[in-house]
Structure formats: C-alpha cells, structure tokens
Image (cartoon, grey):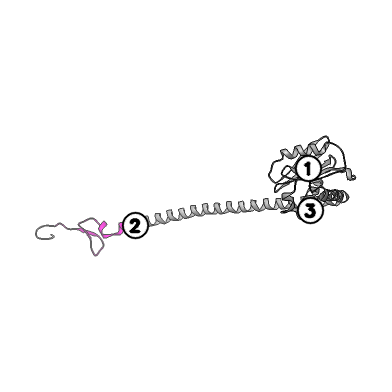
C-alpha cells in the first residue's frame, strides 16, 4: 500500500458531535463525512459510503462513531482494521470519563496526533495485517462450516429419533393387534369346549357316544 496519502481524513464522534479529527489534506472531506455522520443509523455496525473515488468508512459502537476516509485502492478490511485500532485506543484513554463530557473538537490536540500514528502503523504493516485478516476470515469460514455441520448432525439425529419412535409405535400396534387376535381365538376355543356349549339333553356314554333320553313321568324308558 502507498504512503500516508492512502488515508485522507479521520475522526471520532459522540453521537453527531466530532470530538477529535485529523487530516493533512485540504478539501471537502470533513464536510462530506459530517453529512454521512448525520445519516448513520445508531445501531452498532460498520458502514461504507463511496464519493469521488474515496471510501468513507464508519464504525459505530455504543453511541460513538469512528470514521476514516481512504483512497479507493485501499482495501475495506484495512480501513476497518484502522478504525478498530483507533477505537481501542480512544476507549482505553477516554472511555467512561472524559469522552462522555467532551465538547466539539476538544480532543483534537490530544488525540489528533495519535490518529496520525495509527494511520502510519497500518500503512507500515499493511501486508502483515492483510495476511492476518485472511487467516481470520479462513478461521471464521471453517467455524461457520463446523457449526453448520453440527446443526445438520443434530437435525439428522432428531429425525432419526422421530423415525425410530414412529417405527416402534407401529411395532407396538402390531404386537397389540396380534395379542388381541390370539386372545380372541383362545376365548373362542374355550367357548367351544365349555360344557354349556353341549346341547341340552345330550350326554356321553362310556363308549363316548351321546345317548338320547326321553323324559317322562316314570323316568327314562
């Protein structure tokens, strides 16, 4: 990456009030950045705007906005790395104290030169930072794939359990139906063998043949 001209302008703001800014160039960059700041959503996020071959990068976090204007040739991740570095230093120095009560541009003298140092550091270590960001992106991708595979495995396990429950329910139903059929057959056989099922008036002789008796006043004849 080229020299200091890669980064044109930077600021730190509380809400829409710029507390500290730095630039070595003349131009309308501060005015355009201020207009973008007015339109930024308040939610924690990263935002990027393009204007006149320059990229306006914003990092919004906890009510503070960090901005850097970079040439179009500067990678977005490099600009974000600079914003993260500026944010960390600013919060370390002023977080929860001076930053909450500071008035517009009152931190220029203190923090402006530090923003210049951070810009130069990123420029001097751009290759290392790009490699590190690439590794982080790969790790993030692998992590995302692993989490996706875990979700799929859990879903597969859940579906397997549902299928097993369904199959076991069908087996239980078959067992119950079979048992009921066996019981019904046994009851039917018992009814056929019961003495009450032999027609009234028939007995078995010693030979095993039924003999008919005619019942009258004097007994059998």
Q: Residue furthest right?
A: 3
From the image, state whether disc 1 or disc 3 is nearer to you.
3
Residue situated furthest bottom in the rendering: 206
The image quadrant of residue 214 is: bottom left
The magenta stretch spans residue 14: no
**Left or right, 35 with reference to 170:** right
The residue singled out by tag 2 in the image is 187
Question: Which residue position is annotated with label 1?
Answer: 57
Residue 133 in the image: x percent, y percent? Answer: 80, 50
Question: Which of the pair 214/25 is nearer the observer?
Answer: 25
Secondary structure beneath disc 3?
Answer: helix
Q: Quadrant where the N terminus lies? A: top right
Q: Residues within 10 Å of mark 3 (few under 14, many from 20)?
A: some
Q: Is residue 74 left or right of residue 178?
A: right
* Region rendered in magenta: 191-215
Tell whether position 213 is magenta: yes
User: To which residue does mark 3 refer?
Assistant: 89
Residue located farthest toward the top when viewing the structure as drawn: 52
Crowding at label 1, few (<14), some or many (≥20) Cα neighbours within 10 Å? many
Choose between 80 and 120: the one closer to the eye: 120
* Tag 1–tag 2 contact (CB < 8 Å): no
Image coordinates of residue 18 in percent, x first then y, are 76, 44
Q: Nearer the viewer, mark 2 or mark 3?
A: 3
- Residue at 43% from the left image edge and 55% from the top image edge: 176
The Cα atoms of the two marked residues, 1 and 3, are separated by 18 Å
Dot 2: few (<14), some (14–19), or many (≥20) neighbours within 10 Å? few
Residue 76: image quadrant is top right
Q: Give the CA distance from mark 1 to mark 2.
A: 87 Å
Residue 51, position as x, y percentages in the image: 80, 35
Q: What residue do we see at 72% from left, 38% from top?
A: 38
């Amino acid at each position: 990456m080229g020299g200091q001209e890669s980064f044109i302008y930077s600021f730190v703001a509380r809400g829409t009030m710029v507390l500290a800014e730095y630039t070595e160039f003349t131009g309308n960059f501060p005015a355009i950045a201020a207009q973008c700041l007015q339109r930024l959503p308040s939610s924690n996020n990263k935002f990027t705007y393009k204007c006149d071959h320059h990229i306006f990068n914003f990092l919004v976090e906890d009510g503070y906005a960090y901005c850097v204007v970079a040439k179009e040739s500067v990678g977005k991740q490099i600009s974000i790395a600079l914003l993260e570095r500026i944010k960390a230093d600013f919060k370390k120095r002023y977080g929860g104290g001076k930053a909450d009560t500071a008035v517009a541009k009152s931190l220029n003298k203190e923090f402006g030169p530090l923003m210049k140092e951070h810009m130069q550091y990123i420029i001097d270590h751009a290759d290392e930072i790009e490699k590190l960001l690439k590794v982080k992106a790969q790790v993030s991708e692998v992590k995302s794939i692993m989490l996706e595979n875990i979700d799929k495995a859990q879903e597969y396990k859940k579906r397997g359990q549902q299928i097993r429950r369904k199959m076991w329910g069908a087996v239980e139903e078959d067992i119950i139906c079979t048992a009921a059929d066996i019981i019904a057959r046994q009851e039917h056989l018992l009814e056929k063998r019961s003495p009450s099922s032999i027609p009234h008036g028939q007995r078995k002789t010693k030979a095993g043949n039924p003999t008919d008796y005619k019942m009258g006043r004097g007994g059998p004849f």
